[in-house]
Amino acid sequence: MFAKSSALISIWLTLLMGGLLMATNTDACADYPFHEDPNVLVVTRGDEVVNRLPCERIALDGGGRWHNDHIRGQVGQTSDGTIYAQVGGAYGAYWVVGEGLNVMFASDDEGRTWESWNIDLPEKRIIGAFTVLNDDSFLAAATGPGDTSIRYYRSEDRGHTWVQISELTCAPFQNMYLDGNLLQLADGTILSVAHYAVPPPAGADFSQGLGVEYVLRSTDGGKTWQGGPDPALWGPIIEAKLTVAPVGPQSRVPGLGGTFPGCYETGLAELSDGRVAAVLRFSGPAYPWHKDYVEAWGGAAPDNVGRIFRQVMLSFSPDGGRTWAQMRPFVDAEGKPVIVQQETNGQMVETPDGRLVLIHQRRFGPYQLIGRVSENRGQTWLHDEYRLSAGFGYSGNLVLDDGTIITVTGKSIGGNHSAQVIRWRLPNQ
């Protein structure tokens, strides 16, 4: 649809732009030097071991239900302290593999032991996002491959039965899918990340398509949603077969909000100071101005589609996700990026002492799940790397009152697909 000869509108999308890219674990036989002892969490700076911390790793039994390497864990806690984890396929798009992929787990001993049951959503849909709401009900959202809608489901019996409560359609785009977590803010507002797209023509470069990502808002428990694309704006663009591109890192489109192009797989978290943090996978089409930010943003040599950025970036919203500060890299005290290319898909949590913890994938060398820490509210980040898990997987994370971090993640190595819970905590400051 979007041919290379199409006109290029040089504007900056103010909500996220891009598409979810598949990744394959090519390190099935690689050695994992920092993961020999399941009861020890190794902390490194580069390849130097600087600390060893006790931890617990608990395998989650999927009963053979998981058949691909995009296994994603999500986690929440009810008011009685019970922890619930949902494990399934990525964000519910692209990797639907038969029935039984959705599994719910519950723990009443802070994540040490778990019971499980299969989730049977209406129409056999696969959960892409899950959270526990402040009234102890559960909210889930689901899409399927090539879907034209996102459906939201509520459970009043802690995940055993589900009822659809709302549906979003992709018009005037051709398809849509979930591309981030569900987050309920302290004021009750629920945020949900949705990606709207028009695919490129068959065989064309992905930059010839059109993709925009929106942070949607609900103030009635997920029954209705606001903040999506305006058909009056996007309809003519799509009808004219135009693409959309930024002219620089600080451009904005009036009326469209304040997030960024070329970003997706968005991890949202509300911090104790009221800000909403967004961990953004920045890896969209390459634009001419990118070359001016290679060093400052931690870019690298172009990949097979010309991208010099393929890593997580950071932004904060002071107003509950309505507007966002300019995205920026995770940097150390000298202003140098600590995240490099192919470190993607992150989530953030805050410990009781105010430290921020980033948990993200590393997609080079032996694939791993890495934790990083900021001691000054996200201004700068330490070089210490917490080697959480070997293999490939998407994580969900929860912090208990005593500072224990509950990380629920997929773990794919050499074609073997599983999930696990990691109970760990930062050393004292």
Image (cartoon, rainbow, N blue to C red):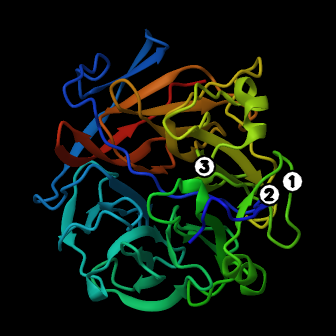
User: Residue 270 versus residue 10: which sits nearer the camera?
Assistant: 10
Name the disc covering residue 135, or none.
Answer: none
Precedes in sequence: disc 1 or disc 3: 1
User: Residue 116 versus residue 363: which sits nearer the camera?
Assistant: 363
Could you tell me how far apart the alpha carbons at marks 3 and 2 are, in whole angstroms? Answer: 13 Å
Which amino acid is tagged 1? Ser
Task: Provide residue 2's location: percent of width, then percent of height.
Answer: 60, 67
Which amino acid is tagged 2? Trp
Q: Residue 295, relative to residue 139: is it above or below?
A: above
Q: Which residue is tagged 3? A: 284
The number of callouts visible is: 3
Task: Provide residue 275's location: percent of width, then percent of height.
Answer: 75, 55
Q: Which residue is tagged 2? A: 12
Q: Are marks 2 and 1 in contact (CB under 8 Å)?
A: yes
Precedes in sequence: disc 3 or disc 2: 2
Precedes in sequence: disc 2 or disc 1: 2
When asked about the image quadrant of residue 189, the answer is: bottom right
* Disc 1 residue crowd, few under 14, some 14–19, many 20+, Cα 10 Å: some
Task: Provide residue 36's location: percent of width, then percent of height.
Answer: 23, 20
User: Circle 2 sits in a helix, a strand or a loop, which is it?
Assistant: loop
When asked about the image quadrant of residue 117, the answer is: bottom left
Q: Residue 189, relative to residue 420: is it above or below?
A: below
Could you tell me how far apart the alpha carbons at marks 1 and 3 are, in whole angstroms? Answer: 16 Å
Task: Provide residue 256's location: percent of width, then percent of height.
Answer: 80, 70
Q: Which residue is tagged 1? A: 251
